[in-house]
Image (cartoon, helix red, strand yellow):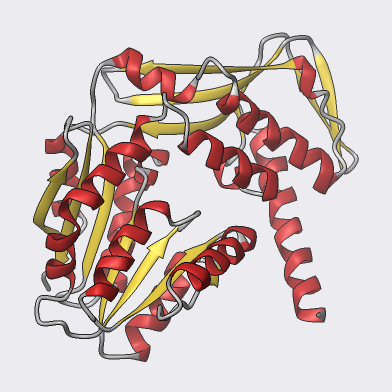
Amino acid sequence: MFETIEKDIIKNKQFLTDVHKGLSDEPKHLSSKYFYDKKGDELFQQIMHMEEYYLTNAELDIFQTHKCEIAQLFAPNKEPFNLIEFGAGDGMKTKVLLKELLDHEIPFDYVPIDISQNALDQLNQSLTKEMPALSFKGIQGDYFEVLNLLKEGNNKRNVVLFLGSNIGNFTNEEALSFTSEISDKLNTGDLLLIGVDLKKEPRKILLAYNDPAGITASFNYNLLHRINRELGANFDVAQFEHHATYDPVTGECKSALLSKIEQDVTIEKNTFHFAKWEPIHTEISRKYALKQLHQLAKKSGFIIKKDLFDTHRYFVDSIWEIKK
């Protein structure tokens, strides 16, 4: 119990530090990783089921169509392995693959890693009910700390899943740093399956991040509500407006919260001034050309093993292998 309280205090201190830094910078920004509290998890599940949010169905299509091929690539001789998923969420797409592996009696441990303990608890409950034979070892925390443990702690192949085009939340430099660090933590023959949203018709992309029902807007507003709840801030959320843009040249879809009036916001005795229509940058979702993705793999120490596409070629699940 005391360990849990101590961890919560440390997490809140980091949250406060990151918020203070982001709102002190020019331009102001907040990290998208803080979207995911309990309410944020619920809103993101709604986003994933929106008609406009094509990414979920596109990647689900890949898993349903290619599940047998993926299973064979992960364990060609049915050898035991660790299936490690970064940011597992509700596991809707992954469940297709988990069932395929279980049906073929391939021995593996499923190790979902997520920043949200709430998401892990819900995933554990659903998987225990749906797949009681599954070896589930969910871990809340830092991706790379867990990879270090798995690299040193056993001789099994590690297969990492990074789905949902979450790589798009990074700048080019951050993406290279992230995939290079994964490469450093893996052993020869280990795999990374990375889900990536491809460049396409701009209006279709923008609708996924600015839907008519306002669910993506609520997802962004919840970040301010969370800062109010957990850090004692006094954001008047009604005085901010969600704004999304897409640049087909860079492939960047950006979200921001604009201050509709000139105002001050106080957090822990610190006051942050907002000019009228001043933005807080909250999220980036980069779309890739396939050539860019292959360059990222090569630069970070991987070789391309297989590219798998959905029916419309909106999305790719690219399987990369470590060759050292």
The residue at the far bottom in this view is 154
Question: Where is residue 236, by image quadrant?
Answer: top right
Screen quadrant of the N terminus: bottom right
Q: Nearer the viewer, residue 219 or 136?
A: 136
In this rendering, the answer to whether 211 lies above or below 219 is: above
Q: Position of residue 146 (x, y in %)?
A: 45, 75
Asked whether residue 233 appears in the rendered view, the answer is yes
Screen quadrant of the C terminus: bottom left
Residue drawn at the location 64% of the way across and 37% of the way down: 22
Asked whether residue 301 appears in the rendered view, the answer is no
Determine whether, in the image, residue 232 is placed left or right of residue 11: right
Q: Nearer the viewer, residue 169 or 172?
A: 169
Q: Position of residue 61 (x, y in %)?
A: 25, 43
Question: Where is residue 281, by image quadrant?
Answer: top right
Question: Where is residue 237, by image quadrant?
Answer: top right
In this rendering, the answer to whether 240 lies above or below 272 is: above
Q: Position of residue 200 (x, y in %)?
A: 23, 22
In this rendering, the answer to whether 123 lies above or below 314 is: below
Q: Position of residue 81 (x, y in %)?
A: 26, 81
The residue at the far right in this view is 269
Residue drawn at the location 41% of the way across and 29% of the way down: 53
In this rendering, the answer to whether 318 lies above or below 197 is: below
Residue drawn at the location 45% of the way across and 66% of the way down: 143
Determine whether, in the image, residue 191 is placed left or right of residue 140: left
Residue drawn at the location 29% of the way across and 75% of the way down: 102
Q: How many marks?
A: 0
Determine whether, in the image, residue 153 is placed left or right of residue 66: right
